[in-house]
Image: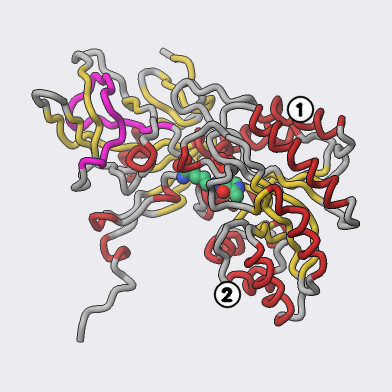
Amino acid sequence: MTTPTLPGHPHIAYHEGELCVEGTPVHALAQQYGTPLFVYSQASMHDALAAYQRGFAGRKVQICYAMKANSSLALLQFFARQGCGFDIVSGGELDRVLAAGGDPGKVIFSGVGKTRVEMRQALRAGIRCFNVESEAELEVLNAVALAEDSRAPVSIRVNPNVDPKTHPYISTGLKGNKFGVAHERTVAVYRHAASLPGLRVVGIDCHIGSQITEATPYLDATDRLLDLVQAIEAEGIPIHHIDFGGGLGIDYNGDTPPAADALWHQLLAKLDARGFGQREFLIEPGRSLVGNAGLCVTEILYLKPGEEKNFCIVDAAMNDLPRPAMYQAFHAIVPLQPRSDCAATKYDIVGPVCESGDWLGRDRSLAVQQGDLLAVLSAGAYCMAMSSNYNTRGRAAEVLVDGTQAQLIRTRETAADTFRNERLLP
Ligand code: LLP
């Protein structure tokens, strides 16, 4: 019996009653490595990247994987080998890029709060560009670069004041957000940046938000960005690259974001029409490269029927999968081996953490028994990377699947690992 792939998950499907990632049954991985366990499909990451590459075929482009989505070293290694650069937001992320064999010359550094130490580290590593987010940051970067006898390559992150129509916590391009330089201030800030001896203006960038499922916000932001490029260049300051920020949203629950190649087709038509088609472009996709490549396997510890709610208590929790607790986010949850020997019941799927906010799914209809294994889908992005040790729970293990091969890429964290840096009183 072969059933179709799950929506949004071309390489995750049931074969003969077993959930498989590519050619590998997930149940066997859980038996070997325990749960909770993150499992990633390499083919999914490859296909997601290929859609961007197709969209930009024939153009000068650098895809910089926004590694905050999932910074596990083996995944970084995969993207580095595919020619990707990286969008980083901390010195720690730069250390990870270097540890994974990434090219610092393809790294761009975003974020509103870069420290002097991080700036110096990035300058010494020879990164491609600092995406500067405020006038105060420009001054500090200039001073750090001069002290290093260097010139920092900069792009100013513009806040285009465009509504991305996504969750407020992941909207970044509106006036009330902390990110970027206000649209109206941009030309003046570029004029100042160009006058500072420790800086070299190389580009412009914007990022309006994450989990965007419509093309219009991107098209509107692009128009505003191009108006600015014209105004800045009219001042005699050349803009070598245009960086469009993060990528598309993904299908969590019937969401229908445009395909990456289709969106870029539309954007490039606009860029061509306005005479910018031959610039170098940068993009910083995160979620769309890894989100639907990953799932998290968890075991049902207890079924707890109640008057108002039935609870399905599993061994994964908000420390492993923080998105439902933080954003009320929906992740599909499916059994690894669907049963026909018991009736479906409605459950809230919750973890062992001592918080009522520790839920992974609400009102889900499942035919399950204690000891069954479930997969939380769309868990490749912003799950492991946002995981914590709350309740002294070690972080989960991770496996990367390539066809019938499965590679353990992170061992399960032990309790001793979680308190290694702590010291007892004398
Ligand atoms: N570039 C910048 C400057 C960003 O801030 C982000 C995401 C990206 C690129 C990547 O965006 P993406 O392609 O993944 O949409 N934890 C939240 C998402 C936070 C996104 C933060 N910035 C979540 O789980 O939904």
If you read the primary sequence from the N terminus, does the residue marked by circle 1 or circle 2 appear first? 2
Towards the viewer: 222 or 56: 222
98 above or below 226?
below
Identify residue type, mark 2.
Val
413 above or below 54?
below
194 above or below 346?
below
Question: What residue is shown with label 2?
Answer: 117
What residue sits 77% from the left and 73% below the top? Answer: 198
Residue 303: image location, x then y, percent = 15, 30
Q: What is the spatial separation of the Cα atoms under label 1 and label 2, in whole angstroms?
A: 40 Å
Towards the viewer: 194 or 53: 194
Q: Answer with left or right where residue 320 lies relative to residue 61.
A: left
Determine the quadrant in which ligand 1 lies: top right
Residue 270: in magenta span: no
Residue count near mark 1 (Cα–Cα under 10 Å), binned few <14, some 14–19, many ≥20: some
Name the image quarter holding residue 154.
bottom right
Q: How is the image coloured?
A: secondary structure
What residue sits 81% from the left and 47% below the top? Answer: 229
What residue sits 42% from the left and 44% below the top? Answer: 383
Residue 223: image location, x then y, percent = 75, 35
Quadrant for the C terminus in the image: bottom left
Residue 361: image location, x then y, percent = 30, 30
Question: What residue is shown with label 1?
Answer: 265
Towards the viewer: 60 or 200: 200
